[in-house]
Amino acid sequence: MENREMFLEYMTALGEYHRAKVSKVLMDIYWRGLEPYTDEQCKKAFDLCFTEETYGFPKIPAIKKLMDLPQEITDEHRAIEAWIEVTDKVKSIGNYGTVEFSDPTIGQCIDAIGGWYHLCQCTNEQWTWRQKEFERLYPIMSKRSNDNFLLLENKGNKISHELNESSKVEKLRQQAQQLLKEENES
């Protein structure tokens, strides 16, 4: 591995994801253990650390095993990538800006979990639950047709859409809740 910055970002993300303290000593150990591998191999393995079943913070041998798995982008992987985009937008734009996402499903999911303003106002504990809710909802919503691209614009506590049809948003929210309910029952 050559890209130290990418390595540090992934290690920090893994620490937050597993609620583990990642010390400088631990990072140095992981760096030495993964140094012989390419950046692409490590990136693949780190990405899979978020979608594959792991028990606690992954050890170096577990990360190496993930390098050998076939690169298959799963629904969970797409949901995590989408959540990363949401997190980046929250940090860079905040709740008083116009938000445009690369995937219209992201906007639909945000509406379904309470809207952009409320998402930006979450506490750390609430943020964790919003993330779980988003990552559960995203695969369901992405399977639906995405006819309308949503452009969210926050004005205080009100979110206006490019289509400016609040009834469609409410219907979308109800459909999402129904889909989650059906998934829980099965």
Image (cartoon, rainbow, N blue to C red):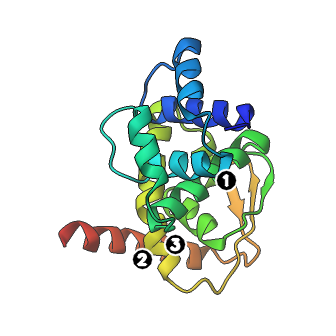
In the image, farthest residue toward the front: 36
Mark 2 Cα-neighbour bin, 10 Å: few <14, some 14–19, many ≥20: some
Amino acid carrying mark 3 in the image? Glu
Q: Earlier in the sequence, mark 2 or mark 1?
A: 1
Q: Quadrant of the N terminus?
A: top right
Disc tally is 3
Image quarter of residue 87: top right
Secondary element under disc 1, as helix, strand or loop, is helix
Which label sits in the foreground, 3 or 2? Answer: 2
Q: Which residue is mark 2?
A: 175
Q: Which residue is mark 1?
A: 85
Q: Which residue is mark 3?
A: 170
Mark 1 Cα-neighbour bin, 10 Å: few <14, some 14–19, many ≥20: some
In the rendered image, the vertical position of residue 178 relative to residue 123, given as above or below: below
Secondary element under disc 2, as helix, strand or loop, is helix
Amino acid carrying mark 2 in the image? Gln
Q: Quadrant of the C terminus?
A: bottom left
Q: Residue at x 58, y 79 (%)?
A: 168
Which label sits in the foreground, 1 or 3? Answer: 1
Q: Earlier in the sequence, mark 3 or mark 2?
A: 3
Mark 3 Cα-neighbour bin, 10 Å: few <14, some 14–19, many ≥20: few
In the rendered image, the vertical position of residue 10 relative to residue 74, given as above or below: above
Image quarter of residue 146: bottom right
- Give the camera-side residue of 12 and 139: 12
